[in-house]
Amino acid sequence: MDVRISRLANGLTVVTDHMAHLETAALGVWVRVGSRNETESQHGLTHLLEHMAFKGTHRRSARAIAEEIEAVGGELNASTSVENTAYYVRVLADDVPLAVDLLADILGNSLLDPVELKREQHVILQEIGGVQDSPEDCAFDQMQETAWSGQPLGRTILGTPQTVSSFTSEGIREYLDTHYRAGNMVLAAAGKVDHDAIVKLAETCFADFPAGPGGGFEPAIYAGGESRQTRDLMEAQLLLGFEGKPYKHPDYYTIQILAGVLGGGMSSRLFQEVREARGLCYAVYAFHWSFTDTGLFGIHAAAGEEDLDELMPVLLGELARIGEHVSETEVERARAQIRASLMMSMESPVARAGQIARQIMVYGHCLEPAQILERINAVSAEDVRRVAAQTFSGSAPTISAVGPVSRLMDAASIAQRLGAARSGAAQTGAENGQSGRFAGIGTGKPL
């Protein structure tokens, strides 16, 4: 790893990772602005602005932007998330100057033409409609809205038809001027790149970006709760969530490993019990999302209505069991998955550019792979058990369900069962003649 960092006079951070064996480069601009920076009336504006960046500048038409990058065989794309927006390019090494110039142009000289705006608003309305056509996407959006109800973090990235339709070129320009400031941006590049050359390009191309940080966002307060959407579907999309850990939390890597042990692959507890042993659904997995000041630990499963009575008790049984015991073998297997994923990503310039940009935004510096591996290897089975017990008992659950969900138990009953399982698992298991694996709640019976 050959990472170098420079900060320009206006505050723009330039970070590069030279990968000498490559002939290509991946580079982009990451901006510390996402959907949670929006006010209620701005809901969806960050994402719309990302779209509008490609719709023409004072120097290039929308068609010219596409033609110039494709004329050199490059790829140009962008993405909006909860806390940042990224604009990135993949090109041959000789075309890095064009890529830097193009990125600066679309971010600093966008026309925000009203005609193009109308057209793009229509495109996003179709995008919103597409999400509504996907029960799984609806369930995930619904979970976030429920976990942080009434807060910016709980709002969807796309916005609503009402808010998206209300945006004007003037409002977008004001939002752009507030957040797209040099101190709020990171130019990251990986592959066959020369750090000094990119710094010189940035000093020229990004010189006119105003100094200073962008606007902030309000702290999030996890609430939990439940949201159900009954639909006439073949299967129900089910999400069960709990408050997780922010990026800088001491247990960040522990909870990532917890997600792996519980539902990170075919050898995980959930897959083996829910899919292999009981055949209750095709796929089931656990995940953890981190943000600056909070996080969300979740489990996703999809099952037919007739299986919901058994599915939820089995899921809860696994949550109770993992809070009681975790083996070193399970932890090492999850560690190996994370290590492999990390090392594989190091071989991709696209992944590396994103990694170093996000590390700069979160930590203010880049982490050496050895540092990350050391933190991962330091996690013990007892750490995972402790964090599991804290996570599944320390916050109200969030339930999101879409489909035939009338037989699904409510959030209050789930919380009660989780508490009861911790205090009475052994006794209940003895009374039911069961082993401790599903004691108390993993009986497969309606609750």
Image: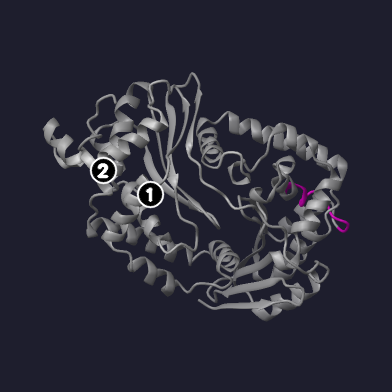
- Mark 2 or mark 1: which is in front? 2
Magenta range: 51-59
Is 54 part of what is drawn in magenta? yes
Q: Residue at x 54, y 74 (%)?
A: 19
Which is nearer the N-term, disc 2 or disc 1?
A: 1
Question: Does residue 153 show up?
Answer: yes
> Horizontal placement of 190 versus 235: left or right?
right
Q: In which quadrant of the rendered view does residue 412 lie? A: top left
Observer-nearest residue: 206 or 318?
318
State whether residue 242 is above or below residue 110. above
Looking at the rendered structure, the secondary structure element under dot 2 is helix
Tell me the residue that label 2 is attached to.
422
Amino acid residing under circle 1: Thr
Observer-nearest residue: 429 or 179?
429
Tell me the residue that label 1 is attached to.
391
Observer-nearest residue: 367 or 199?
367
Q: Position of residue 346 (x, y in %)?
A: 48, 67
Label 2 neighbourhood size at 10 Å, few (<14), some (14-19), many (20+)? some
Amino acid residing under circle 2: Arg
Question: Does residue 332 show up?
Answer: no
Q: In which quadrant of the rendered view does residue 364 lie? A: bottom right
Is 417 part of what is drawn in magenta? no
